[in-house]
Amino acid sequence: MEEPGTVYFTGTAGAGKTTFVRAFADWMKNAGYEATILNLDPGAENPDLAPDVDIREWVRLDDLQDEYGLGPNGAQVAAADMIALKIFEVKQAVVELKTDYLLVDTPGQVELFAFREASKAIVDALSGDRSILAFLYDPALARTAAGFVSLLMLSATVEFRFRLPMVNVLAKSDVLTPAQLAEVRSWSDEPGEVYDALTRDPATLDGQLSSELLRAIESMGPLSGLLPTSSKDAVGMDDFYRACQRVFLGGEDLEPSHAPETE
Ligand SMILES: Nc1nc2c(ncn2[C@@H]2O[C@H](COP(=O)(O)OP(=O)(O)OP(=O)(O)O)[C@@H](O)[C@H]2O)c(=O)[nH]1
Ligand SMILES: [Mg+2]
């Protein structure tokens, strides 16, 4: 059987990953598509999550903390390795559900997912080539120019770790005013705009540093547009679906959006 088209949802803690996965799965079901939710966060506590396949059946953060006397982050590191050992059982549970789309919720602290070698093994084993990363921008950070550039850099870092196509999503866009939303969109469509916004700031080290980061990102290649969405108001789900489909069906979007020109 062909692998399901798989989307891994990443982003800073509290960016809205879990809520988005739920809202997007609901949207897909209403639109007549098959979607399965896989929770890969062994520390998830949200009872509303209701994943179809839950890593906590195999690995639980609280058990690891109790058993080995670890803190929450140490336990997440240990959990990533344990999940890699169990991944073929997890995959079997997914295969039995015969889904077209697999939506994967990842641990809150993005570096604990993106910076572990075990995570690459997990992604390879679960979905191979039919994988996309979604990176959720938290509007609390994205609405300032320096915060926006920090998120660009982080999303590029996640993309480099996995070498997969990435769709960038502005989460919770309902919390932004129309003017704020228009500004954030202009930054994503035209990197020069965010550069201007940074240089309009008082010349702080923060601003200068962010400008250097932006130049580095610009030199990596074109950025893909940021899709405004709201899980609360079910906004942008169709755009997100179309962006994923474009990647799965091939075409130029198969290249990572921050791809360097030569390898
Ligand atoms: N206004 C608004 N709030 C949202 C939206 N999506 C999520 N939230 C809120 O944002 C907070 C974090 O959402 P989560 O979905 O738990 O975020 P997460 O990225 O999964 O968080 P961790 O896994 O803990 O890192 C919650 O209080 C949500 O209710 C949205 O579209 N609009
Ligand atoms: Mg979550």
Image (cartoon, grey):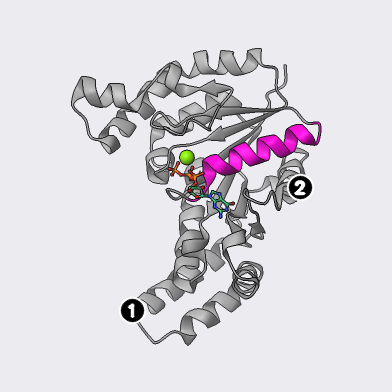
Quarter occupied by residue 132? top right
What's the magenta bit mostly, secondary-structure-wise? helix
Out of 182 and 212, give the one closest to the viewer. 182
Compared to 137, does 101 lie above or below? above
The label number, if any, that marks residue 205 in the structure image: 1
**Residue 2, image x, y percentages:** 72, 21
**Residue 62, image x, y percentages:** 30, 26
**How much space separates mark 2 and mark 1, taking CA atoms?**
40 Å
The residue that mark 2 highlights is: 238
Q: Give the range drawn in magenta.
A: 15-32
Amino acid identity at mark 1? Leu
In the image, residue 16 lies in the stretch drawn in magenta: yes
Out of 204 and 68, give the one closest to the viewer. 68
Out of 75 and 263, give the one closest to the viewer. 75
Q: Confirm whether residue 9 shows in the render.
A: no
Amino acid identity at mark 2? Asp
**Residue 29, image x, y percentages:** 74, 32
